Image: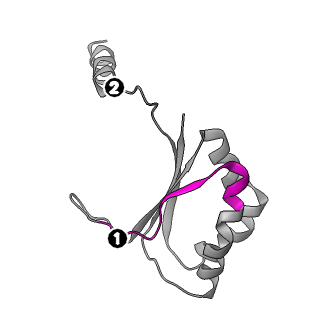
Amino acid sequence: MPAFALAHLRTPQLNDDVLEYIDRIQATLDPYQGKFRVHGAEVEVLEGDWPGTVVIVEFPDVERARAWYASPEYQEILPLRARHIEGSTLIVEGVGPDYDPRRTAARLREAAAG
């Protein structure tokens, strides 16, 4: 199943370190087949509060997403961003092409009924 690395960058800003990070990040993703799906897009908030922007990178599976984040190559450049931009980063497993939310609802109902 695909996996996604998401970053909520609450205080995006540009400076030499951040630009270097952006220049170098793709080389850290390539060995793990990571591909940007959202990067630098304007965020349209429909509910709640969302300061900043979001980045989404897709990987073939959660193992490769974790391996990328832990890789020495990524860890080397991470401070270039983290020193200047406050944010949160997470990895989440996606759903397969046959996912049906009705099956999830049924499982949740069954679990709640106990």
Q: What x and y, as percent, mark residue 2?
A: 54, 39
Magenta residue span: 28-43
In the rendered view, would you say 43 is above or below 109?
Answer: below
Closest to the observer: 45 or 41?
41
Give the quarter of the image for residue 16. bottom right
Task: State the mark number for residue 73.
Answer: none
Q: In this view, does 77 lie to the left or right of 62?
A: right
Give the quarter of the image for residue 26. bottom right
Q: Residue at x 26, y 13 (%)?
A: 113
The C terminus - image quarter: top left
Q: Which residue is drawn at 30% across and 14% down?
A: 110
In the rendered view, would you say 26 is above or below 65?
Answer: below
Q: Residue at x 56, y 80 (%)?
A: 84
C-alpha separation, residue under disc 1 versus residue under disc 2: 29 Å
Inspect the magenta stretch and tell me whether residue 37 lies in it: yes
**SS label for mark 2:** loop
Residue that mark 1 sits on: 42
Q: What x and y, as percent, mark residue 34?
A: 62, 52
Q: Is residue 109 left or right of residue 98?
A: left
Mark found first going from the N terminus, 1 or 2:
1
Q: Residue at x 71, y 61 (%)?
A: 28
> Which three-letter amino acid code belongs to the residue tagged 1?
Glu
> Which three-letter amino acid code belongs to the residue tagged 2?
Asp
The N terminus - image quarter: top right
Give the quarter of the image for residue 10. bottom left
Q: How crowded is mark 1: few (under 14 residues within 10 Å), some or many (20 or more)?
A: few
Residue that mark 2 sits on: 100
